[in-house]
Image (spheres, coloured by chain):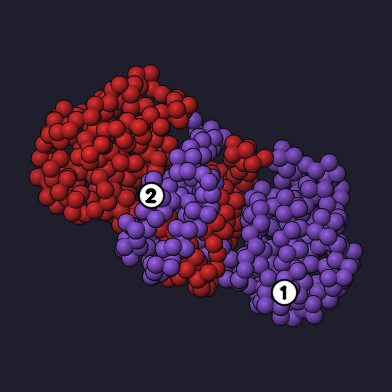
Chain colours: A red, B purple
Amino acid sequence: MTGRVGPDQVRTITCVGTGVIGAGWGAYFLARGFDVIAWDPAPGAEGRLRHLIDAAWPALTDLGLADSADRARLTFEPDLARACSETDFIQESAPEDLELKQDLLARIDAVTAPEVVISSSTSGYPMSDMQTRCAHPERTVVGHPFNPPYLIPLVEVVGGKLTSEDTVTWASDFFRYAGKSVITMQSEVPGFIANRLQEALWREALHMVNAGEATVEQIDLSITDGPGLRWPIQGPLLTFHLAGGQGGMAHMLDHFGPSLKSPWTRLEAPELTAELRDAVVDGCAEEAGDRSIDELVAERDAGVIAILRALGRV
Amino acid sequence: MTGRVGPDQVRTITCVGTGVIGAGWGAYFLARGFDVIAWDPAPGAEGRLRHLIDAAWPALTDLGLADSADRARLTFEPDLARACSETDFIQESAPEDLELKQDLLARIDAVTAPEVVISSSTSGYPMSDMQTRCAHPERTVVGHPFNPPYLIPLVEVVGGKLTSEDTVTWASDFFRYAGKSVITMQSEVPGFIANRLQEALWREALHMVNAGEATVEQIDLSITDGPGLRWPIQGPLLTFHLAGGQGGMAHMLDHFGPSLKSPWTRLEAPELTAELRDAVVDGCAEEAGDRSIDELVAERDAGVIAILRALGRV
């Protein structure tokens, strides 16, 4: 698009909405050496924003600041039009309310040069539902972070029906340039990927609490001292790939496939068709690449030990 | 029970079944300084067992062996009766097949002194369904580990209908004495706690793969670079407690409770009654103890950094 700066040419970022997520983005962008302009209409927002950034700064310093990083490069701008007039990128992190997001995105859109990409931190709404009132919806995109955005690497990027492919590519490249781990999704699904997984787990946890089968503390302990220790190293599917022994995911699905139907959760399982089975098996093989099962096990073990050490548990 | 040794008096442990889980238990118990007797009827089982233990030994050495730990204290015994005749504790880790488990537990039960506790590694069957053919079912109990049992601390302990309370207490105390992190469940639920949570996530992942919404690699990356980095430090419920900001879980449920009903997963959500809401809020408060939100955030941040460092990502 004419006039759009390259993803690695971004110098100034506007953070619209400075609650926990917006302030976290602000802290992260400052630490990476960007100029940050912040806007939030709530009374006392600037004070809370500066407090949150100061609270995050020691962690960010510990991780290593960009040479030019400076908290003095933060400007709090009470006027939305001025906050958006001279910027290279906008990250919106307003409260999770569809009407509010539709309205706010339209307001941002109206005062921002049409080539500037506007990204939303929404944790669940498809951009198709949020971009409806924008005059330039093609430059709006979801860039969904995880709390705290200054420490958790993941950003999920996905466009809406009216978003241009160029915008999705640009946003993915920009977040990668800014140091994030980016998943670019090909299709919109409410909750994106990680939140759908988290929510499935969360609802099962609520069922267990509701039925008196487990306490909150038992549920959390079952993750922190159990499978949670593996998940920073290998995701849930690669974890099951290893649980299949040398036979990997194929053995796993061929032997335990039928137990998908056992009533372990209140989630209805999909039909395990040959296509699904193959898609999962092939996906694991692709992810494993040229690493053998033994190498993956060694990787996992070294990682778990490193984590146990890092957390002072051994 | 007459003749049962104290949980901290156990010297000899019999591992029945020496696949990935049984061998992992064997390696762990040897590393903690126990004598281990192993039995497995599969051809070549002894060779595979010794290979698996040798593979785990460097990690176990790195974590710190008990003074008396010695791989020479492993005996492979091809006769089940002899394997069970002189032992203080039995851990069964046979394949996940209900008929097979019922039969095997009955066979173990018939050749083991009645005061010896028999624990099963089953990853999902209630002990009530497995102990049906035992003459002394009161000493049978589930002791469910996580792969690899020599690294992941968690063991879920739960009895069946015919299990004595003394057995559940003894097994919990023994696993704790042996260095594990123990959850003692009050009631039987298929899949116990962690596996129900894992399965909920796993099925949602399968739905996404099935619908073409995400690839295996995207799903795993969404966890390893996203919420998975938090889960070794704080479980899923405490995670949402922090997502509520200073208002914690109460704010979270009061504001986002209605979105439980949004179609983010194919899992039907429970009715968010006042009782359920309070149970979750109170459970979080209890788990947080006297730690403030700020302290929990600082704990989380320090932990995430430590993990990122430990895994060589920063």
Mark carried by residue B300: none
Q: Amino acid at mark 1?
A: Thr
> What is the chain letter for disc 2?
B
Is disc 2 placed on a helix, strand or loop?
helix
Residue B44 quadrant: bottom right
Q: Is residue A39 visible?
A: yes
Q: Position of residue B87 (x, y in %)?
A: 86, 62
Q: Which residue is mark 1?
A: B163
Query: Front-most of A238 and A143?
Result: A143
Residue B100 image offset from top left, x and y in percent: 70, 74
Which residue is label 2 attached to? B247
> Pointer 1 indicates a residue of which chain?
B
Label 1: few (<14), some (14–19) or many (≥20) C-alpha neighbours in 10 Å: many
Task: State left or right for residue A128 relative to residue B4.
Answer: left
Q: CA distance from mark 1 to mark 2?
A: 43 Å
Q: Secondary structure at mark 1?
A: loop
Query: Compared to A48, does A282 lie above or below?
Result: below
For residue A81, side relative to residue B28 (left or right): left
Residue B24: horizontal and vertical position, in percent?
71, 53
